[in-house]
Amino acid sequence: MLHSKNNNDMFTTKEEKKAAEEISNSSNVIGKGTVIEGNIETFGNIRIEGRINGNIKSKSKIALGNSSHVDGNITAQNVDIEGTVKGKIEISEVLVLKATAVVHGDISTGKLVVEPGAVFNGTCKMGAAIKDIKSADNGATTHAYRSEAV
């Protein structure tokens, strides 16, 4: 193992920024027929076609396909839902409920788009106050909601 005399030599700000950018641009796919028991947390985008029994958290976008089924809470920047969700949904920017979406739970989002045919049972709050989303790995914090003047 190599050790540097000066810890500041290990990474430059530019390298750290590039690594963080690569992580946030990554994409994940949970295929149809896949069942996951447990929570999912990612900095990048994720598309889900299978079943998740647990919470999902993303610093980017979550796309729930037509065959998706989520029993748990969802926290993200943007979400498109075509499948079924049973749980609380907290979105900092835009939530889109496609025509085939079925949501049973409360929604808190910056903006909401509901296509004809979508089903939503719960309460909805828009333009929510600032709430921090913390990553489990490193305690890093990003603002998930911004307060907006009405």
Image (cartoon, grey):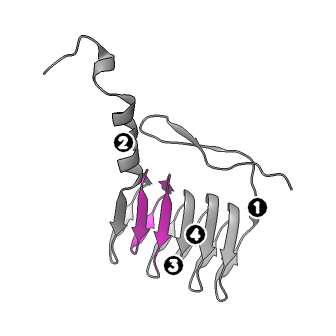
Foreground label between 1 and 4? 1
**Label 1 amino acid?**
Lys
Can you tell which mark lies on residue 125?
Answer: 1
| Badge 3 or badge 1: first in the primary sequence | 3
Distance in Å between CA atoms under marks 4 and 3? 10 Å
Q: Distance of mark 2 from mark 3, alpha carbons?
A: 34 Å
Crowding around mark 3 (Cα neighbors within 10 Å: few <14, some 14 to 19, many 20+) is: many
Looking at the image, can residue 73 be seen?
no
Counting residues from the start of the chain, the first of labels 2 and 1 encountered is 2
Residue appearing at x 49%, y 34% in the figure: 139
**Residues under labels 1 and 4: Cα distance?**
17 Å
Instruction: Compare marks 4 and 2 and give the one earlier in the sequence.
Output: 2
Name the image quarter holding residue 95: bottom right
Determine if the magenta segment contains residue 63. Answer: yes
Helix, strand, or loop for circle 1? strand
User: On screen, 84 above or below 110?
Assistant: below
Observer-nearest of 28 and 103: 28
What residue would you read off at disc 3? 83
Residue drawn at the location 14% of the way across and 20% of the way down: 2
Return the residue found at the far top.
Answer: 5
Residue 73 percent location from the top left of the image: 56, 59
Q: Which residues are magenta?
A: 42-65
- From this view, report whether residue 142 is shown above or below residue 37: above
Position of the C terminus, as image quadrant, is bottom right
Identify residue for label 2.
18
Q: Which residue was labeled with disc 4?
A: 86
Q: Few, some or many C-alpha atoms within 10 Å of disc 4 (few <14, some 14-19, many ≥20)?
A: some
For discs 2 and 1, the disc positioned in front in the rendered view: 2
